[in-house]
Amino acid sequence: MVDQYMPVRRLSATEKLWQFPWALLMLVAVLAAFGATALYSVAGGRTEVWAEAHVLRFLAAATAVLVMAQVPVTIWSRIAYPAYGLALGLLVLVPLFGSEALGAKRWLSLGGLTIQPSELMKVGLVLALARYYQAVAPEDVSRLKCVIAPLVLIFVPVLFTLRQPDLGSASLFAALGVSLMFLAGVSSVYFAAGAAGLGLASPYIWAAMHDYQRRRVEIFLDPDKDPLGAGYHITQSKIALGSGGISGKGFMQGTQSQLDFLPEKQTDFIFTMYAEEWGFVGAIILLTIYAALLSMLLAMALRAQNPFSRLLIAGSAVTIFLYIFINVAMVTGMVPVVGVPLPFVSYGGTALTTLMAGLGLAMAADVDRNSPLWSPLSRFHPATGERLTAAGAPMAGILGIVPKRVLDRVRLR
Amino acid sequence: MAGSDHRDLPSGERFTRRVLLLGLVQAAGFAALGTRLYQLQVMEGGRFAPLAEDNRIDFKVLAPVRGRIFDRAGIELAHNNENYNASVRLVREIDLPKTLKLISEIVTLPAGEQATLLAKAQKQARGSMMIIASDLSFDQIAAINLLAPQLPGVETNSAHRRAYEYGDAMGHIVGYVGRVERHALDDDPLMRLQSVKVGKSGVERGLELGLRGKGGTRKFEVDSRGRIVRHLEEIEPVQGSDVVLSVDLELQKKVVARLARERRAALVVLDVTTGEIVAMTSTPGYNPANLAAGLDETEWKQLSNGEDQPLLNRAIGGLYPPGSTFKLVTALAALEAGAVTAKDKCDCSGSFELAGQTYRCWKRQGHVTADLHKALRESCDVYFYNAANRTGISKIAAMARRLGLGQIYECGLPQQKRGIIPDPDWKRAEFRAGWLDGETILAGIGQGYVSTTPLQLAVMAARIATGRAVVPVIVRLELGIIPDFEDLGLDTQALALVREGMIAVVNEAGGTGAEAQVPGSRILVAGKTGTSQVRTNDQNDDAEDIWEHRDHALFVSYFPANAPRYAIACVIEHGGGGGAAAAPVVRDVIEYILADDPVSRPYPKSKVNAAKAMPSVSDDGGGGNG
């Protein structure tokens, strides 16, 4: 028996604050400040429209991140599957009780609270996959049954979001999940086979898409087809970016956004608005800050000591990257308009909450990095030292919130 | 301690490798975004900048107030009444049906009209303005402005509606305005304004450029809904120049009333010293006020295609064979060429033979024998057959042109006809045939191919009266300005002979124009009658019975004969003999002038703004050699 149960010395609250990755939070605060500035400009020099609320939301979220980082990573690993199960349950309820907007059912009203289960799922999926790979032996990750189980975890929410329909979230789940599987060490053969399969399946995907989704893709491919209709957004965004030039039109001087030619300028198209006023130089500065943030996260992932922590941190990095890439690629006309906001800069609480929650988990994992003796997320039961197996856990996750007792009973041997 | 969980090591290495790979993928993603941004913002930035500018900047062309038109005494003939209209900018954010519905609560806008406007909006360019209601009262405009927040893109503008006074007398001269036709669009952005109307006829058309004025522009920033965010700059429109016509309304009214006794007729009164057209009438007439108000289709058809063509200004657009009035041309040409002298006599037996053809004199028994004086006085055809034959067509045609026939005067009167002064070159071009001597004989008495307008005949009379190249104008010259017309270089003796002949026509016994004498006046009138045949002699037997077959009656004159001031030409279609039908009309007009001389009216300087040099539009009205 090589593996053994190690007793844990818990860090004190002060120690945890000392360990907290402050630089990372500062970088995020800088991005939120960029957002507030852009929102102040886009509101025609008023704070009360968007900028103020944006700052308050960020401060609340940052406080939440600090609190989340205090929670021992073992707790997070315990609630990983339940969280996934809860998110999935809500996702299932959306088509039944959800409210419809713009031709899609995405929101769920619970009491006075309106939530978007697909956002919850973005955190839940990372948690579940990280939790799953914590329980799989490294030599087992490429075994077929250990590939199928995470694929199920990924594609169940993909299917439900596609039905809403929410192409943006669905593709984000897919990309996020596949990235985490790749990081977990699944053999490259599977990814090559998956890419080939996707290529073959694409005509059927096209056929299964909604008309408005197909139209978006068509207009993306040729925005001039309908310059005043659906291609309007892309065309106006390109005009705004192009006319911004190298150095931009200046703070509060962006005519395209100030005069309302730019749609969704405070949310999905805020990058365009920002780059119109600050030009190519400003755009590159913003992208550089994002790159720094992602580098820090990946470095954090590298110094983590167990699969759960690593994937939690890397999952947060991948989510942020996907948001940035899809958003900027969308406003520059490289991918169809799918409605993904720019992380920490765009106005709106939902995405901010999701992204900050992801960061909070990553930070919680990082704060506990120096407790290797405990091996908090061993594939062995913390109490009994029994080895857990790969198959049962995800099943339990999919079934929803399962009490620990039940979970324990499902394990083999 | 890393070593304690040693089974993680291999997977840890793999994780590190894969994280680095992921980092590379992310770096590649950022590189792609950076490249795309470089392409859009740096390489293609110049292409997008004007597009953003187009989005942002909107121009509004401000219509100038059209210049007014006065008679020579300063009586207003055309002016502008202020009214209002509402228009909407056709941009994609505007819900036009809803806008129209809201507007219809203020202005009566029946459902059918709303549908028409919606259909029209489909055809118009996006971003352009469309008038949705015009002729609005101030109260209606105020109500629309009050609703402005619910009516994005709707603008209210003050507009002007052209109004005409004394249209019955002045219709042909003043003309009227109408919507700009697509093919008539010129470079002036004003023409694209729906509220702007342009001259369609008369002085309104002929002096369009001066009357129109210059459009101003208002430049402003708009948002995507077309709402004005801020005004950038404004260039005021320049009001169109007012025009003082040379025509005297008082005289014109009397002449119009006198000519109204005829079915179709035209008369022109020229001031021979200035070339000013003092009166110009064409019967039947029309009132442009009715046209400006808008006609329905049947009314318009009747006006434009009616039997007597009331829209046609016969004074400049009616072509008539000048008949015997042309003998003045033949006489001057023959004298200058030496083909005849004052003393030469010609036997008139009532006919003239050439190349087997017989040409009759109007007086069947003939004039026995005639010299030039008698030939003019009694209008002996045979004398002028001989004279024309000896002079030759080229010299006759040249003299006709020197005297102002066969040309269009760029005086601000559109739709003039050029008429025909035939010569061998003209005939070759027109018929691909050679000139026949017999045609010279006919041309010598103003028949055959020769055709002229009443205005040209008045110019001819004025040129004979002064010996100078009088050019007609429709705009009054300021007092004291007397144009220095070029001397025609005519032999003074020849001129004297012709002038004496013209005096004899009216004042000597046997003269054909005795009716033109002004009874009880010492004013001596000079003139020449003309009776031009509509059909050939052989056909002309029923001429007295059928109106359309009767001869045209013509009379040209100038007076006072010893110090000429006015020249008058009068044509009465199918009026019969010139002496009997046209001369009395001219005499009446002379009496009107003598009773109330229009030349003496003071120049109405105080009423007029910027009546400086008016650019005129050259326009031959498609007449040509029609």
Image (cartoon, coloured by chain):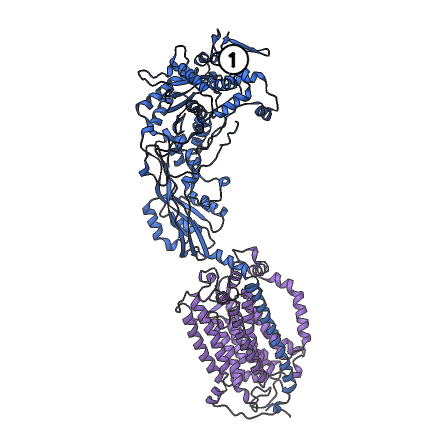
Chain colours: A purple, B blue
Residue A332 visible here? no
Q: Is residue B574 above or below residue B280?
A: above
Locate residue A408, reporting x and y percent: 57, 85
Q: Is residue B49 above or below residue B266?
A: below
Residue B149 visible here? yes
Name the foreground residue: B474 vs B19: B474
Disc 1 marks a residue whose amino acid type is: Asn
Locate residue B318, reporting x and y percent: 46, 25
Q: Is residue B529 left or right of residue B480?
A: right
Asked which secondary structure carries label 1, the reply is helix
Residue drawn at (46%, 36%), measured in percent from left and top? B617
Label 1: how many residues lie within 10 Å, few (<14), some (14-19) or many (20+)?
few
Name the foreground residue: B89 vs A210: B89
Chain under numbered label 1: B
Q: Is residue B426 left or right of residue B581?
A: right
Residue B134 picture quarter: top left
Q: Quadrant of the C terminus of chain A?
A: bottom right
Name the foreground residue: B203 vs A149: B203
Locate residue A348, reporting x and y percent: 46, 70
Q: Is residue A296 above or below residue B100?
A: below
Locate residue A123, reporting x and y percent: 53, 76
Q: Which residue is mark 1?
A: B537
Name the foreground residue: A218 vs A384: A218
